[in-house]
């Protein structure tokens, strides 16, 4: 479910009119729906409720404090990849004891911070990192809870830049080496406490088969490690794909397939139905680390058409949002549905490139896309931009970071203010 639809010809986020919102707060503007976040989180949480489980939302997908607070209120945990993300979780009202700490390059400061706050577990990605966590924990008189990330060498069949579970990726330790690594930890690392085993095979998976393949491959290893080292949990990672093309007409909430997407993609029920029976016999706590699934469909980027440029080969709609605001199209060939905020009165369309103001050829939101005819000054909504949208935004071209709004029913809260020009130079100094 998502909560963006046309009401009387105008696109709304829940009960908030986006045209009015954009006029009040300016564009570009990220707008999130709290109901959609809650709905997605809860649906996953309930689909696996036969398992002792914890849904650890992957903070890197969208780390706004209000989003984290929403997840915390739903009882969620958090999968973090930096000390900065831990700081955000704590500031948002989340508990360290429900945080897992992933990532290949944790620093001493981050490890100490996480130990002092009492996180649930470090998910370690190499033996060198385990050695280092052991040393840091020993130096401050603590025992660090650890899980090893296994690289199951399974093809997630997603985009190359978001595939993580193949042996040529930098993530995790090879499946075959896991038993010796656990033995080494238990013998050589007195400041580590083996607590679990983790995997994460990639992002935006649109079929359930790679998940099944990975769980089937790793479950026997988990059972063996549980027997020997008293594991408490198995984390199956995140990666649940979302549909990037949706129906936005009032009353209809169905998903439908878009370019490069199956008409019947992975559903949360098919995901749960196929993996829960494989996980139940383990008798362990199961962790899940969804990012995109929780927030992807819950956010949009509202942008204004500034100019139209008709070239020999193409028509460009130059909008005020650029790759610095939403990098997915150019970084991952991410496909976002783009719709007018004010529904067109006729069905005329044209094929255009929707591009931003940044001085880069890669600065586009869509290429060769058929969209309803829009003119200069019109507002467009770039849909399903809630995940890996704002968190990947930058100040490139000295553009202030845009504002973020959280809609809750008929209320719209500014959850991050638009940066000012002063913000752009804060902390900079001219010597002398
Ligand atoms: C990024 C990441 C996730 C979340 O991935 P999604 O595709 O957004 O669900 C989960 N776990 C780890 C270790 C990650 O790096």
Image (cartoon, rainbow, N blue to C red):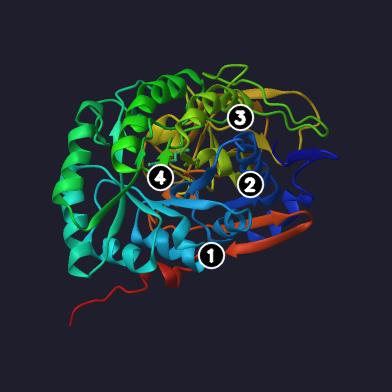
Residue 405 in sight from this viewpoint: yes
Q: Within 8 Å: ligand 1 and the Cβ of disc 2?
A: no
Q: Within 8 Å: ligand 1 and the Cβ of disc 4?
A: no
Quadrant of ligand 1 in image: top left
Which residue in the structure is indicated by mark 1?
92
Dot label at residue 268: 3
Front residue of this view, candidates 352 and 54: 54
Neighbour tally class for label 2: few under 14, some 14-19, many 20 plus, Cα within 10 Å? many
> Closer to the N terminus: mark 1 or mark 4?
1
**Spatial separation of the CA atoms under disc 4 and disc 2:** 28 Å
Q: Residue furthest right?
A: 8
**Label 1: element kind:** loop
**Spatial separation of the CA atoms under disc 3 and disc 1:** 27 Å
Dot label at residue 232: 4
Residue sitting at 53 percent across and 42 percent down? 53
The reply, left or right, for residue 127 in relation to residue 114 is: left
**Spatial separation of the CA atoms under disc 3 and disc 2:** 14 Å
Q: Quadrant of residue 168?
A: top left
> Closer to the N terminus: mark 4 or mark 3?
4
Which residue in the structure is indicated by mark 2?
37
**Label 4: element kind:** loop
Q: Residue furthest bottom?
A: 432
Residue sitting at 20 percent across and 46 percent down? 186
């Amino acid at each position: 479910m998502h909560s963006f639809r046309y009401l009387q010809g105008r696109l709304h986020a829940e009960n908030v009119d986006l045209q009015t919102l954009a006029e009040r707060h300016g564009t570009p503007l990220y707008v999130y729906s709290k109901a959609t976040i809650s709905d997605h989180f809860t649906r996953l949480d309930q689909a696996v409720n036969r398992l002792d489980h914890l849904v650890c939302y992957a903070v890197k997908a969208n780390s706004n404090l209000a989003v984290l607070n929403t997840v915390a209120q739903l009882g969620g945990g958090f999968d973090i990849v930096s000390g900065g993300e831990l700081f955000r979780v704590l500031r948002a009202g989340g508990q360290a004891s429900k945080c897992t700490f992933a990532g290949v390059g944790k620093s001493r400061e981050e490890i100490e911070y996480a130990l002092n706050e009492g996180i649930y577990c470090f998910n370690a990605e190499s033996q060198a990192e385990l050695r280092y966590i052991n040393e840091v924990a020993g130096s401050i008189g603590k025992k660090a809870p650890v899980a090893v990330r296994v690289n199951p060498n399974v093809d997630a069949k997603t985009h190359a830049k978001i595939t993580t579970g193949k042996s040529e990726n930098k993530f995790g330790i090879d499946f075959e080496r896991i038993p010796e690594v656990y033995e080494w930890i238990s013998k050589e690392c007195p400041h580590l406490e083996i607590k679990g085993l983790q995997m994460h095979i990639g992002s935006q998976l649109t079929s359930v088969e790679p998940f099944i393949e990975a769980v089937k491959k790793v479950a026997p290893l988990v059972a063996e490690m549980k027997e020997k080292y008293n594991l408490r949990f198995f984390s199956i990672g995140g990666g649940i794909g979302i549909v990037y093309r949706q129906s936005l007409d009032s009353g209809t909430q169905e998903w439908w397939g878009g370019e490069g997407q199956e008409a019947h993609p992975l559903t949360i029920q098919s995901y749960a139905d196929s993996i829960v029976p494989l996980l139940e016999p383990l008798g362990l706590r199961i962790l899940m680390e969804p990012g995109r699934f929780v927030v992807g469909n819950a956010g949009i980027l509202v942008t204004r058409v500034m100019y139209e440029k008709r070239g020999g080969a193409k028509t460009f709609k130059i909008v005020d949002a650029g790759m610095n605001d939403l990098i997915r199209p150019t970084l991952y060939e991410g496909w976002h549905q783009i719709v007018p905020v004010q529904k067109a009165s006729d069905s005329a369309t044209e094929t255009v490139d929707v591009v931003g103001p940044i001085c880069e050829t890669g600065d586009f939101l869509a290429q060769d896309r058929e969209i309803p005819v829009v003119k200069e000054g019109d507002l467009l909504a770039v849909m399903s931009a809630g995940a890996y949208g704002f968190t990947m935004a930058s100040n490139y071209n000295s553009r202030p970071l845009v504002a973020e709004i959280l809609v809750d029913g008929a209320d719209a809260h500014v959850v991050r203010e638009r940066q000012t020009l002063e913000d752009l130079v804060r902390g900079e100094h001219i010597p002398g």
